[in-house]
Image (cartoon, helix red, strand yellow):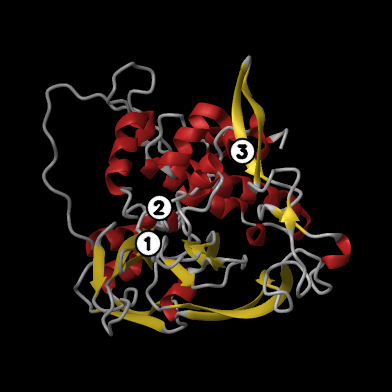
Amino acid sequence: MATTAEIDLYEVLGISQGASKAEIKKAYHKAALTSHPDKVPTEERETAEIRFKSVSQAYEILYDDDKRHLYDTHGMAAFDPASGAGAPGSEMDMDDLLSQMFGMNMGGDGFPGMGGGFGGRGMPKRPRKGANEKQEYEVTLEELYKGKTTRFASTKNVVCSTCKGSGGRQGAKPKQCEACKGRGVTTGLKQVGPGLVTQSTSECNTCKGTGETYKEKEKCKKCKGKRVLETRKVLELYIPRGSREGDKIVLQGEADQHPGQEPGDIIFELSEFPHEKFGRVGADLTADLNVTLAEALTGFNRVVLTHLDGRGIQINVPQGQLLRPYQVLKVAGEGMPMKRSDQKGDLYLEVKIKFPEDGWLKDDPSMQRLRELLPKPGPPKIAETIDEVEFDPDATLIDVGASSDDPRAGGEWLDEDEDDDDDEDGAGAAQCANQ
């Protein structure tokens, strides 16, 4: 991983090093939406896939406080197991630690003369549980709305049924491993920085951590002394309706098997892919309600959007009831399903009015009739001195105070307002839907 040390994860997401978690999440949603391979032309998919993987990696590390601290301290070297800089997942359990310190398995015999482990004489030896396998599973909002069951093939190691995990033929007696002297681990020095070394412990490559070896002719014929066999199994993953980002789906005991250990679990963490039309906040959904100026003034009765399950959602706005820009309509019971319940959240529609293009009225009589139909303006403003000024119709609030050092300048206070809405519970999802 020589190149990973050069990656600037903050630059990948386009954020500063002091960015909040809300800013990180917002930047990820925006970058993921624009760089997803399915959203670009075929000839650009290879480049988009590389970009998308970089964006996902940056979000995974920077959004997690512990991983972000490791990255800020050590850079990408912290996530390279070969670098020895404290990569996540390198933790050691107590049994391994005591085994390395005292050359024994504390889960069973314990200290010599103590008649068992710390629990005292006669305590049964409980198999240690193997490591869990964690994976991210990306799902669409449609799949979370309707629920999903998927089957996939998993390749994993299982204990050899012929030798029962011993690695040797029946009746064969193992010998102490010469490389590790029966400890199952070897120690050595590893450089962790300029002029700094530390003692590191790793599994013995000769005996694979067992502390014992067999002669070649005494090894199990089926597993060749490896104690495990690689097998393929079809697993089923069920995602309940109403699941959300961060939920974990656990397949118990489906991780790799190791002799003398209880197999670990396969844990899938759900990652919700940003939706083009809907935003999600808890069990509620948000979407834009796009209407014409005529509809906003005179009402309408039509299907305004297609829901996540394919149903058309029809809205009836009667004549005389006006819609105003950015007005929000609440549709009760049309949000996301709630897990283990028949209830649903609500759907919030934000009114977006499409105004006509400049010059859409071509003649003065039509303009006059429109003025007669619309409400009349209020009384004119009275001033002693009047200046007729020109204006720029394409300005934005970001321009406010742009040339000053005032902290309330447009870009600053606009970002703060957005941050208030874009909290860690996902309130910023509505913004993603508008991009």
Q: Check disc 2 and report the residue beneath it.
A: 114
Q: Secondary structure at mark 1?
A: loop
Quick one: 127 or 83, which is closer to the camera?
A: 127
Q: Which residue is mark 1?
A: 121
Tell me the residue at 29%/63% (across/down). 369
Q: Which residue is mark 3?
A: 201
Furthest toward the front, the residue is 113
Spatial separation of the CA atoms under disc 2 and disc 1: 7 Å
Q: Amino acid at mark 1?
A: Arg
Height in image: 117 above or below 4? below
- Three-letter code for the amino acid on which mark 3 is drawn: Thr
Toward which corner of the image does residue 243 lie, by quadrant?
Answer: bottom left
The residue most toward the right is 217
Mark 1 and mark 2 in contact (Cβ < 8 Å)?
A: yes
Q: CA distance from mark 3 to mark 1?
A: 30 Å
Q: Are marks 3 and 2 in contact (CB under 8 Å)?
A: no
| Residue drawn 35% across the image and 82% down it | 314
Q: Position of residue 360 (x, y in %)?
A: 45, 58
Residues at marks 3 and 1 touching, judged by CB atoms closer than 8 Å = no
Image side of residue 291 versus residue 239, left or right = left
Identified at 38% across, 23% down, the residue is 402
Specify which label sits upstream in the sequence, 3 or 2.
2
Q: CA distance from mark 3 to mark 2?
A: 27 Å
* Res. 162 image quadrant: bottom right
- Which numbered disc flags the more N-terminal residue, 3 or 1? 1
- 340 w.r.t. 376: above or below: below
